[in-house]
Image (cartoon, rainbow, N blue to C red):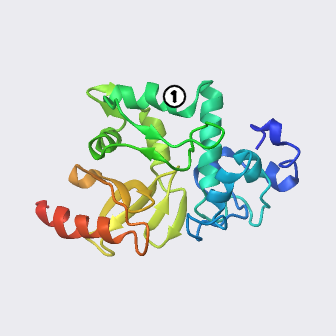
Amino acid sequence: MAQFPEYADVAGDAAWGRLRIEHALTMTMGIDWNEDAPYTSEENSEIAMELAPDRHRYIFERAIVEEPGSRWRYCGGASALVGRLISSGAQQPLEAFARDVLFEPLGIGSFEWTAGHDGVASAASGLRLAPRDLARIGETVLREGRWDGREVVPENWLGEALRSHVSIAPGFEYGYQWYLGAFGTAPPSVRWKGGIGNGGQRLLIVPELDLVVALTAGNYDGDQSITPRTVVDELILPAIER
């Protein structure tokens, strides 16, 4: 990770030297990271990262336990590094960059983004949008990066971000910070691309059906997929003529 020279003292070994930005984008960094613990516990690596004096130093202090690029493991630290790269390249805070190049062009005027104790937006979590505004992002993705006839996100970037780069499980894959899956396990299954958030938050883009689904939920205990799965499988899909 040569893009972070200020952390060379903790990220200078040979294993860290093999990491590329793509490994952060695809959450295949291979670092010692565990988000299976509750998000109320410091045993959860994302929580420990946010409580650390320097979240990025915390990430680079993790050991490399697998060959980078070999396996997907959910890692909020990867998103934090991507956020830091964006803000550094844009020379402005992450939330200001998002407002200027994405939210305002889409007509999204109101959003909240949780910040750490250092005042820096937490790229791994904490962005709050109204469902209708979240759907605007999905509609832009569905239209290959265009909103109201204007290109907001480069089409070639979306094509790269939304293709499969690593398998999570059979039929469930990951691109660049986006998930790829299907409704149904056998033909005629319908492919979707989307964002999956803690508590049951979902943004699903279904090109075959010209469909965008934005769901917000707060089911932080138990099976978080129950609410979105029920809404999609029992309400939305049956209402669409295919």
The foreground one among 55 and 97 is 55
For this rendering, which residue is in front, 198 or 50? 50
Can residue 198 be spotted in the picture?
Answer: yes
Q: Point out the image quarter for the N terminus.
A: top right
Q: Is residue 41 left or right of residue 101?
A: right
- Give the residue type at disc 1: Phe
Residue 84 locus on image (x, y percent): 64, 38
Q: Which of 159 and 26 is in front in this view?
A: 26
Query: At 35% across and 42% down in the image, what residue appears?
Result: 141
Q: Quadrant of the C terminus?
A: bottom left
User: Measured from the top left, where is residue 40 in percent x and y?
Assistant: 56, 64
Kindly identify the residue that appears in the image at 25 percent across and 54 percent down.
Answer: 208
- Number of numbered tags placed on the structure image: 1
Relative to residue 64, is residue 82 drawn left or right? left
Place of residue 150 in the rendered image (x, y in percent of width and height, measured from the top left)? 32, 25
Element type at mark 1: helix
User: Which residue appears at 14% of the width and 66% of the height?
Assistant: 238
Up the image or down, 146 lies above or below 38; here it is above
Can residue 28 be seen by looking at this rendering?
no
Q: Is residue 86 above or below residue 55?
A: above
Please state the horizontal and vertical placement of residue 75, each as a whole percent of the image.
61, 58
The quarter of the displayed image where residue 90 is located: top right
Residue hosting label 1: 97
Other residues around mark 1 within 10 Å, as few (<14) / some (14–19) / many (≥20): some
**Residue 156 in the image: above or below residue 124:** above
Q: In which quarter of the view is residue 109 placed?
A: top left
What residue lies at 76% left-to-right and 38% top-to-bottom? 4
